[in-house]
Amino acid sequence: MKGIIVREPGGSDQLELTDLPIPTLSDGELLIKVETAAVNRTDIVTREGKSGYAKSAILGVEVAGIVEKTSETSHFKIGDRVMGLVNGGGYAEYAVMPANRALKIPDNLSFEEAAAIPEVFLTAYQTLYWIGKLKRHETVLIHAGASGVGTAAIQLAKQVSDAKVIVTAGSKKKLEFCKQLGADILINYKEQSFDEEVLQATDGEGVDVILDFIGASYWEKNLASIKKAGRWVLIGVLGGAVVEKVNLMELMAKYVQLSGTLLTPRSDEYKADLTKEFAEVVMPHLERGNIKPIIDTVFPIEEVATAHHYMEENRNIGKIILRQSL
């Protein structure tokens, strides 16, 4: 089969399409004929050699495709259309997926749309509900609102919790798209001080939950934006990982719950449990169409370097998809 590997840690020029053996199955796994895969920030971090949890020489952590072969304990059958998280290996013609992390693709969704679901929607669900404990009618601040996880989180917060959603993004186009998804308050972080806008929108109280992709550069403004006893979930460090001169008393005085998380390095059991709950709570919304996967661009897999570069420039609204065209 053909697959994408990284020759040496570095830039997108290190990505190579090469011949590889078709993976073999273990008990409880599915062999998927991959139709589409999605590009994620974790793929870029892995390509650069900055992550220590990649288990496969082939990039890619989520796919959509057709079950080619099943193990004896699987309840899926050959020919089923499925999507889900894989432990690497997604940028290839075939990939192995644990059966307990596979989701049947609803009839109303294409393979491109299906590949846009697992990583971002499971991440958004995990951060909003398992960690952020978002309740109905609470207020949530979602940074990078037009990103893959951001667009998923906006929809989940509105459709599942009827929450008040405040988003930040860096352009009028991105903010307008967030509004179409259900965002209530739109903040252009390049032109506005988001903490001032948040406090104005919440009568000075702040938000119940913050979904933070940015990290260090937003530290002070996030602290000002969060309500007493608010839950602040850190899932990215696009604005830096090191905060200088942190005053812990400021966190204590507001009794803030600050949590950090990543999904990719979590255990298979954790991802299976998350997938099961997601299927029960969110899949009906996807089947009805009131929650939708958001796709920015679909690239043929041969153009994977261009796709990575596109993400690194933060040009996308929603997901970047790779389509098998070999």
Image (cartoon, grey):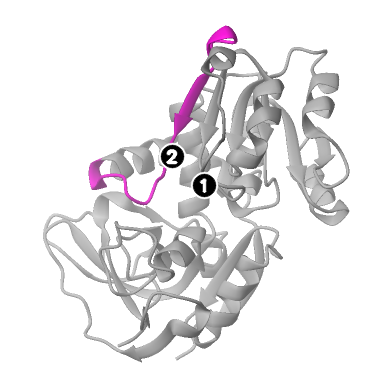
| Badge 2 or badge 1: first in the primary sequence | 1
Image quadrant where one finds the N terminus: bottom left
The amino acid type, in three-letter code, at marker 2 is Phe
Left or right of residue 311, residue 69 in this image: left
Q: Residue at x 26, y 45 (%)?
A: 267
Tag 2 residue: 278
Task: Please tell me whether mark 1 sits on a helix, a strand or a loop.
Answer: helix
Image quadrant where one finds the C terminus: bottom left
Given contact means CB atoms under 8 Å apart, are the residues at marks 2 and 1 in contact? yes
Circle 1 residues within 10 Å: few <14, some 14–19, many ≥20: many
Q: Nearer the viewer, residue 32 or 320?
A: 320
Query: Residue 81, percent across and down?
Result: 40, 65
Q: Nearer the viewer, residue 136 or 266?
A: 266
Q: Is residue 92 above or below residue 77?
A: below
Q: Is residue 268 visible?
A: yes
Q: Is residue 158 visible?
A: no
> What separation in Å lies between label 2 and label 1 (alpha carbons)?
9 Å
Query: Residue 46, percent across and down?
Result: 40, 65
Q: Nearer the viewer, residue 79 or 16?
A: 16
Q: Residue furthest top?
A: 253
Q: Residue at x 21, y 76 (%)?
A: 23
Tag 1 residue: 121
The range drawn in magenta is 252-269
Task: Please name which of the two marks, 2 or 1, marks the residue nearer to the observer.
Answer: 1
Task: Please tell me whether mark 2 sits on a helix, a strand or a loop.
Answer: helix
Q: Residue at x 63, y 46 (%)?
A: 150
The amino acid type, in three-letter code, at marker 1 is Phe
165 in magenta: no
